[in-house]
Image (spheres, rainbow, N blue to C red):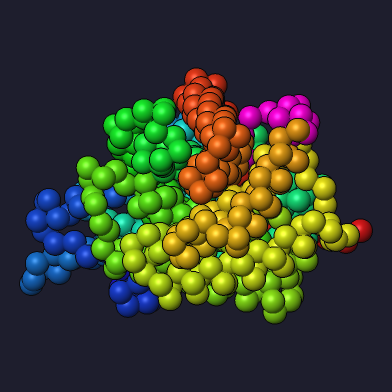
Amino acid sequence: MEKSKAAYMAKEDGIEELPSLIKVTTAPEVAGFDCVMHHDDEKYRLKLSGFHCFSSSAVGTESTAAEGQNNTSHSQITHSVSISMPPSPLGAHLENTNELPSLDKDVAIAGNDIPNSAATSEKTTRTKFYSQPMPKGPAFNEAIANGSVPNPPELPLRNPMIHKLKNRPFDPFKTGSGKLERQISNLRGKHLETAQDLESQQPAEVEALPVDRYFDALEGPEWDTLRASEEILLPEDQTWPFLLRYPISSFGICLGVSSQAIMWKTLATSTSTKFLHVSPDVNLVLWCISVALVAIVSFIYSLKVIFYFEAVCREYYHPIRVNFFFAPWIALLFLALGVPASVSQNLHKSLWYILMTPIFCLEIKIYGQWMSGGQRRLSRVANPSNHLSVVGNFVGALLGASIGLKEGPIFFFAVGLAHYTVLFVTLYQRLPTNETLPKELHPVFFLFVAAPSVASMAWAKIQGYFDYGSRISYFIALFLYLSLAIRLNFFRGFRFSLAWWAYTFPMTGAAIATIRYSDMVTNGVTKTLAVFLSAVATLTVAALLVTTILHAFVLRDLFPNDIAIAISERRPKST
């Protein structure tokens, strides 16, 4: 009894004084709590010395040893280890700049190596920190990234993707808006929490805009100028990716070049222009160039559909851009009309049905909106580019009649004639809802010439000769052509853009119609007019083609940032 009391008193003398708010509880009082069981094996007894802190901050340790001996069995020693955590891993790092003794130097193993309490207290005197909640994972990294917590070199960010996500402003317009990247992250073994954090950091997906947002956020006759009170989703001070800047109006280049192939085929086969001795090889070369150009433009825009489908959807829902979705199919119709005799003598009738199906579907949508009213009613969206939807009917009727069809061409000719009449009157009277076109869009006025020119040839092919109906359409086109050509302001005072290609196929169409008319009314005036208009159309297309190549590959300013597709879904706050 006396020995046990002496041991108990010695143990009591070795306990350090603890703060009054902490209750002193010895380890043996709670079974299995804060205890490490050691056996006689020397390596197992020294296992405790391999414990290391997981951060560079100082960790205060306190240890007390209780010794017992059992002579009838193997020795068993219980060590009580208490670890005091700092308020934060950074606080300890900043307050304790000197290296502190590690845990294996502070913990004394019971036995012959137990030092006295005085020596132990001298070695372990230090500032104590008590356990506090410690941020971890994405929350801690985000705090460091935002600058609210110092970022020492010993504590690097666990997730460097946070910085990358902030530098990807074009992701909302990508197909899927980054969903594929998140799936790849999951496949690489990232935890669910990390994947959700990455998803929350990514830009929100672009949603389909309501119709009125285009009218509220944009202004101008082409609805492509951002209002001062609006904001866009993409940075204005950066050059956007090429595919994101590549517009559907690029198919206007294909219309101009492919129409030239038709014109030179007509010059080579027409009786009134035999004196020119035009070789069919010219038509073959131009047709091959047109095929290559259509393939290149279509391939590039297909890449935009694949990688930036959200941007394509915004062009489709744009009240003006939707008209240019007729251009790819009209270009294919031009290629079918201009095919050289050495390539194909007779086209299969199924080709006409294939090419006219998408045109018919687009017309159901657009003409229905014109008639039903609402935000997309014709009186509000009327623009010379609307002629593209009408020209498709007449070109389709011309091709159908050329390959031997009858009812289908008449159907599309009637639909085109009805809507051209309405569009012509709407654009002519310039309702208050229509703004005056700026100088940069003066070339689109020549689209007025395209529809009646092609309509005259389509009706002549349906009837079998250039009758009075065809002549009426031709004379309307010729008058509009002359009334626009004498206005020099329509050709100067504005910078080059893709809108200039609106000059090309209306001029070419007027030249082809003049050649067809000169076959019926052959004299010096009609022949001279046919040659003159053909020369003007050819020079215009050649000049624009060279200028386009110069701006695209040398000056590199042909495709500016497309503000019209980047408007924000949020409405501006009213002040």
Q: Position of residue 73 (x, y in %)?
A: 8, 71
Residue at the spot 29% in from the left edge and 43% down from the top edge: 340
Q: How many marks?
A: 0
Residue at the spot 30% in from the left edge and 34% down from the top edge: 280
Give above or below for 570 relative to 499: below
Give above or below for 314 relative to 72: above
Q: Which quarter of the rendered picture does the C terminus lie within?
A: bottom right
Snapshot quadrant of residue 440? top right
- Side of 78 relative to 204 (left or right): left
Q: Is residue 112 inside the magenta stretch?
A: no
Q: Looking at the image, can residue 209 be seen?
A: no
- Side of 429 relative to 394 (left or right): right
User: Toward the viewer: 218 or 348?
Assistant: 348
User: Toward the viewer: 341 or 549?
Assistant: 341
User: Toward the viewer: 569 or 436?
Assistant: 436
Q: Looking at the image, can residue 43 be seen?
A: yes
Snapshot quadrant of residue 321? bottom right
- Side of 512 relative to 283 (left or right): right
> Given the current orientation, which residue lies at the most extreme right position?
575
In the rendered structure, which segment of residues is drawn in magenta? 487-499
Q: Which quarter of the rendered picture does the N terminus lie within?
A: bottom left
> Given the current orientation, which residue lies at the most extreme top position?
554
Q: Position of residue 85 (x, y in %)?
A: 48, 54
Residue at the spot 44% in from the left edge and 62% down from the top edge: 464
Q: Is residue 490 inside the magenta stretch?
A: yes
Snapshot quadrant of residue 441? top right
Q: Position of residue 558 (x, y in %)?
A: 56, 32
Residue at the spot 53% in from the left edge and 68% down from the top edge: 413
Q: Position of residue 209 (x, y in %)?
A: 63, 66
